[in-house]
Amino acid sequence: MFKPPHCPNRFCASESPEIAFRFCRRGSFLRKCDGRRIPRFRCLICNRGFSSQTFRGNYRWRKPILHHSLMHLLCSKVTRRQAARILGVNRKTVERRFTLLSRIAHDFHRAQLNQSRERGGIHGVFQIDELETFEHNRRIKPVTLAVTIERHSYFILGAFAGKMGSRGQLNSQYRRRKRLIEMEEGPRRSESRRVVRKSFDLLNYYLDPKASAHLQSDKKKSYPVELKKSCWGRDIQHEVTSSRDVRDYHNALFPINHTLAMMRDGLSCLVRRSWAASKKKSGLQRHCWIWIAWRNYVRGVTNRTKTTPAQALGVSLSSFQMKEIYHWRWPMRLQARHTQGVQIP
Ligand SMILES: [Zn+2]
């Protein structure tokens, strides 16, 4: 029997911890897509009506089944345009679902991490590296993607996309285009340092308060500086490996190199020398969250094992199916309620 965990109305007074959420049942209706009977409820605090369907990730979508195929396609090197062709739907349909699914995947990831933080936080050896790609134009609008993982479990903590300054030695045609773009968007400054800092802030937030920050990376100079700023007051261990070393299994940075290679393989917008590069940085960022949710919570650490990276690191206690990732519409709100001791259906 479904029991609503909170009021779907974001502005309801029961959102504050002082006022308890109370509801009553109010009939039911037949769901059009499969003819099931869905119970309706009414919030006794704000008097709004809702049903169990309101909490679902596929709420109000005419073809709820499309979510599933789309999530799988987006993790399998298929572009959004091609996904629309395969599924036989409009490109805008895919685009709207992509935005929603990415938000849900990101929320799901954060909710899982928050739960593990309540249990004491994560600990392990972490690795960071930046992957280079671009939006629209490879020479004028390069983009960096800072990815942080835990070394033994291959758990991806986060990936943040940021702008990079235009490359040097542009020919006259490129210079003209660059001027036109700058007139529209302003000068392009590098956000590399900002995304690295964001990655370390995230690491510091979810790390076990008593654990030391153990990081492995290449010799980039901004890493130790930003790590010190983010993990102030923590014991810091930072090991560096030259990026010129042979990148084989014996390289200390093999896990992060392997993860970046997997991203290049699974995310259509990161495949090199293709037409699929992202048009906007935000699209790349959204696509990353969907892929990360699949990599961390659905796929096994290797092809042979069924243990997921999240299980291996102790972030979640079980593995998930793809449909469980986008099952709930607001994973973060569910998690917040969980913290307050409310039983999640
Ligand atoms: Zn309410």
Image: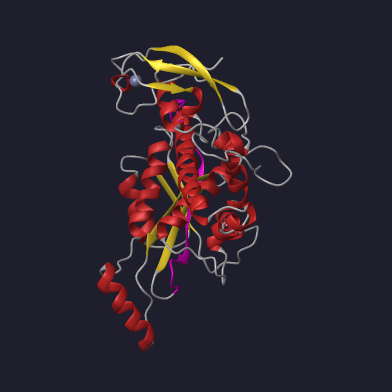
Residue 130: within the magenta?
yes
Instruction: Determine the quadrant in which ligand 1 lies.
Output: top left
Front one among 205 and 209: 205
Q: From the viewer's side, name the closer residue of 162 and 283.
A: 283
The location of residue 184, given as percent across then percent down, is 27, 70
Tell me if I can see residue 101 in this picture: yes
Residue lying farthest to the right in this orientation: 304
Answer above or below: position of 338 versus 280: above
Pinpoint residue 42: horizontal percent, then vertical percent: 40, 16
Residue shown at 38% from the left, 82% from the top: 174
The correct choice, above or below, for 132 with respect to 9 in the image is below
Residue range in magenta is 117-138
Residue 121 visible within the image: no
Per the image, is 192 magenta? Answer: no
In the image, 235 versus 244, the foreground residue is 244
In the figure, residue 222 lies in which quadrant? bottom left
Q: Residue at x 33, y 29 (%)?
A: 10
Is the image coloured rainbow, by chain, by secondary structure, or in one colour? Answer: secondary structure
Which quadrant of the figure has residue 221? bottom left
For residue 185, side relative to residue 61 (left or right): left
Tell me the quadrant of the picture where the N terminus can be found. top right
* Count of marks placed on residues: 0
Q: Is residue 314 above or below residue 245?
A: above
Question: Position of 214 compared to 245: left or right?
Answer: left
164 lies left or right of 37: left
Compare residues 8 and 303 and report the one nearer the observer.
8
Q: Position of residue 90 (x, y in %)?
A: 54, 54
